[in-house]
Image: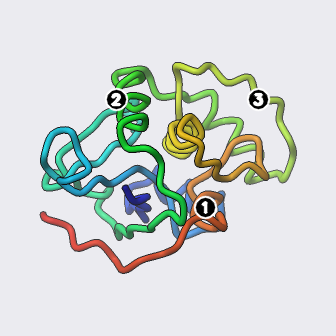
Amino acid sequence: MKLLFCSGNDTFSKLIRFASRSKWSHVGMYFPADESPLGIETVAESICSGGPHIIAAARYNGFNGEVWLASLKVQPDNKKLWTSICWNLGDPYSWAEIVVLAFRLLFKVKVPVTIDRKQFICSEWAQTKLDECGVELGHWNELASPADLSVDPLVAPQAEWVRYR
Protein backbone atom coordinates (compact mmCIF):
# COMPACT_ATOMS: atom_id res chain seq x y z
CA MET A 1 0.00 0.00 0.00
CA LYS A 2 1.15 3.51 -0.78
CA LEU A 3 -0.33 6.89 -0.01
CA LEU A 4 -1.58 8.70 -3.09
CA PHE A 5 -1.29 12.51 -3.07
CA CYS A 6 -3.12 14.67 -5.62
CA SER A 7 -2.58 18.25 -6.68
CA GLY A 8 -6.01 18.79 -8.19
CA ASN A 9 -6.92 21.55 -10.64
CA ASP A 10 -10.59 22.03 -9.81
CA THR A 11 -11.72 25.06 -7.75
CA PHE A 12 -12.16 23.14 -4.49
CA SER A 13 -8.70 21.57 -4.83
CA LYS A 14 -7.14 24.98 -5.46
CA LEU A 15 -8.80 26.33 -2.29
CA ILE A 16 -7.41 23.43 -0.25
CA ARG A 17 -3.94 23.98 -1.68
CA PHE A 18 -4.13 27.72 -0.95
CA ALA A 19 -5.39 27.24 2.61
CA SER A 20 -2.79 24.60 3.45
CA ARG A 21 0.04 26.36 1.58
CA SER A 22 0.80 23.03 0.00
CA LYS A 23 0.97 21.36 -3.38
CA TRP A 24 -1.45 18.66 -2.15
CA SER A 25 -5.22 18.91 -2.15
CA HIS A 26 -6.17 15.26 -1.70
CA VAL A 27 -4.89 12.00 -0.25
CA GLY A 28 -5.98 8.40 -0.73
CA MET A 29 -4.48 4.93 -0.66
CA TYR A 30 -3.14 3.02 -3.66
CA PHE A 31 -2.97 -0.78 -3.67
CA PRO A 32 -1.10 -2.76 -6.33
CA ALA A 33 -3.00 -5.77 -7.69
CA ASP A 34 -1.25 -8.23 -5.36
CA GLU A 35 -2.35 -6.22 -2.29
CA SER A 36 -5.95 -5.62 -3.39
CA PRO A 37 -8.67 -8.18 -2.60
CA LEU A 38 -10.09 -7.34 -6.03
CA GLY A 39 -6.93 -8.54 -7.78
CA ILE A 40 -6.53 -5.25 -9.66
CA GLU A 41 -4.73 -1.99 -8.89
CA THR A 42 -7.11 -0.11 -6.60
CA VAL A 43 -7.50 3.35 -5.05
CA ALA A 44 -9.36 3.80 -1.75
CA GLU A 45 -10.33 7.36 -0.81
CA SER A 46 -13.00 9.67 0.61
CA ILE A 47 -14.38 12.28 -1.81
CA CYS A 48 -16.91 15.13 -1.61
CA SER A 49 -19.41 13.56 -3.96
CA GLY A 50 -19.58 10.16 -2.33
CA GLY A 51 -17.58 9.75 0.87
CA PRO A 52 -15.33 6.70 1.27
CA HIS A 53 -15.19 4.42 -1.76
CA ILE A 54 -12.85 2.25 -3.83
CA ILE A 55 -12.13 2.60 -7.53
CA ALA A 56 -10.01 0.74 -10.06
CA ALA A 57 -6.74 2.64 -10.47
CA ALA A 58 -7.23 2.45 -14.23
CA ARG A 59 -10.27 4.73 -13.86
CA TYR A 60 -8.72 7.17 -11.39
CA ASN A 61 -8.30 10.76 -12.65
CA GLY A 62 -6.55 12.43 -9.71
CA PHE A 63 -8.79 15.51 -9.86
CA ASN A 64 -7.20 16.36 -13.23
CA GLY A 65 -3.86 17.20 -11.65
CA GLU A 66 -0.58 15.66 -10.61
CA VAL A 67 -0.68 12.37 -8.71
CA TRP A 68 2.26 11.14 -6.65
CA LEU A 69 2.72 7.96 -4.65
CA ALA A 70 4.54 7.81 -1.34
CA SER A 71 5.69 4.70 0.46
CA LEU A 72 5.21 4.22 4.17
CA LYS A 73 8.21 3.28 6.27
CA VAL A 74 5.88 1.04 8.30
CA GLN A 75 3.34 -1.08 6.40
CA PRO A 76 -0.08 -1.81 7.93
CA ASP A 77 -1.52 -5.30 8.07
CA ASN A 78 -3.22 -5.51 4.66
CA LYS A 79 -6.18 -7.67 5.72
CA LYS A 80 -6.91 -5.48 8.75
CA LEU A 81 -6.63 -2.33 6.59
CA TRP A 82 -9.07 -3.64 3.97
CA THR A 83 -11.54 -4.63 6.71
CA SER A 84 -11.28 -1.10 8.12
CA ILE A 85 -11.72 0.46 4.65
CA CYS A 86 -14.80 -1.61 3.86
CA TRP A 87 -16.41 -0.70 7.20
CA ASN A 88 -16.98 2.92 6.07
CA LEU A 89 -17.71 2.52 2.36
CA GLY A 90 -20.66 4.70 1.40
CA ASP A 91 -20.63 6.86 4.54
CA PRO A 92 -21.04 10.62 3.85
CA TYR A 93 -18.27 13.15 3.34
CA SER A 94 -17.90 15.53 6.27
CA TRP A 95 -18.47 19.18 5.33
CA ALA A 96 -18.30 20.17 9.02
CA GLU A 97 -14.75 18.85 9.22
CA ILE A 98 -13.80 20.80 6.09
CA VAL A 99 -14.86 23.98 7.95
CA VAL A 100 -12.80 22.97 11.02
CA LEU A 101 -9.80 22.22 8.82
CA ALA A 102 -10.19 25.54 6.97
CA PHE A 103 -10.24 27.51 10.23
CA ARG A 104 -7.16 25.69 11.49
CA LEU A 105 -5.25 26.24 8.25
CA LEU A 106 -6.31 29.81 7.47
CA PHE A 107 -6.39 31.34 10.94
CA LYS A 108 -3.85 29.13 12.76
CA VAL A 109 -6.34 28.50 15.57
CA LYS A 110 -7.32 25.32 17.31
CA VAL A 111 -10.98 24.60 16.81
CA PRO A 112 -12.59 21.96 19.04
CA VAL A 113 -13.01 18.78 17.03
CA THR A 114 -16.01 16.56 17.54
CA ILE A 115 -15.47 13.92 14.93
CA ASP A 116 -18.42 11.80 13.83
CA ARG A 117 -16.72 8.47 13.11
CA LYS A 118 -19.02 7.96 10.14
CA GLN A 119 -18.10 11.17 8.35
CA PHE A 120 -14.66 11.78 6.90
CA ILE A 121 -12.63 14.18 4.80
CA CYS A 122 -9.97 12.49 2.66
CA SER A 123 -6.97 13.00 4.93
CA GLU A 124 -8.81 12.26 8.16
CA TRP A 125 -10.25 9.09 6.62
CA ALA A 126 -6.81 7.84 5.49
CA GLN A 127 -5.30 8.80 8.86
CA THR A 128 -8.05 6.96 10.76
CA LYS A 129 -7.86 3.81 8.62
CA LEU A 130 -4.08 3.61 9.13
CA ASP A 131 -4.40 4.39 12.87
CA GLU A 132 -6.78 1.45 13.21
CA CYS A 133 -3.96 -0.74 11.84
CA GLY A 134 -1.24 0.65 14.12
CA VAL A 135 0.33 3.15 11.70
CA GLU A 136 -0.08 6.57 13.31
CA LEU A 137 0.35 9.53 10.96
CA GLY A 138 -0.15 13.28 11.41
CA HIS A 139 -0.81 13.36 15.15
CA TRP A 140 0.73 16.77 15.79
CA ASN A 141 -2.60 18.24 14.60
CA GLU A 142 -6.03 17.22 15.80
CA LEU A 143 -7.23 16.89 12.22
CA ALA A 144 -4.68 16.24 9.50
CA SER A 145 -4.72 17.84 6.05
CA PRO A 146 -3.18 16.19 2.97
CA ALA A 147 -0.17 18.49 3.51
CA ASP A 148 0.24 17.27 7.11
CA LEU A 149 0.31 13.64 6.02
CA SER A 150 2.75 14.34 3.17
CA VAL A 151 5.43 15.56 5.59
CA ASP A 152 4.95 12.90 8.26
CA PRO A 153 8.26 11.20 9.16
CA LEU A 154 6.74 7.80 8.28
CA VAL A 155 6.03 8.91 4.69
CA ALA A 156 8.79 8.52 2.10
CA PRO A 157 8.10 10.29 -1.24
CA GLN A 158 8.40 8.29 -4.44
CA ALA A 159 8.28 9.00 -8.17
CA GLU A 160 5.23 10.52 -9.86
CA TRP A 161 2.55 8.01 -10.68
CA VAL A 162 1.85 7.59 -14.37
CA ARG A 163 -1.91 7.79 -14.70
CA TYR A 164 -3.82 5.48 -16.96
CA ARG A 165 -6.09 8.07 -18.58
Q: Crowdedness of circle 1 by 10 Å Cα count: few (<14), some, many (20+)?
A: many
Quarter of the image where the N terminus is located:
bottom left
Closer to the camera, 28 or 36? 36
Image spot of residue 145 (x, y percent): 62, 51
Closer to the camera, 127 or 26? 127
Q: Identify the residue position indicated by label 2 in the image.
A: 50
Q: Identify the residue position indicated by label 1 in the image.
A: 147
Which residue is depicted at the point 45% across and 67% down?
71
Eyeballing the image, is 105 above or below 50?
below
| Secondary structure at numbered mark 1 | helix
**Disc nearer the start of the sequence (2/3):** 2
Q: Identify the residue position indicated by label 3 in the image.
A: 113
Image spot of residue 133 (x, y percent): 53, 39
Type of amino acid at the residue the image marks with label 3 = Val
Q: Crowdedness of circle 3 by 10 Å Cα count: few (<14), some, many (20+)?
A: few
Which residue is depicted at the point 53% across and 43% down?
130
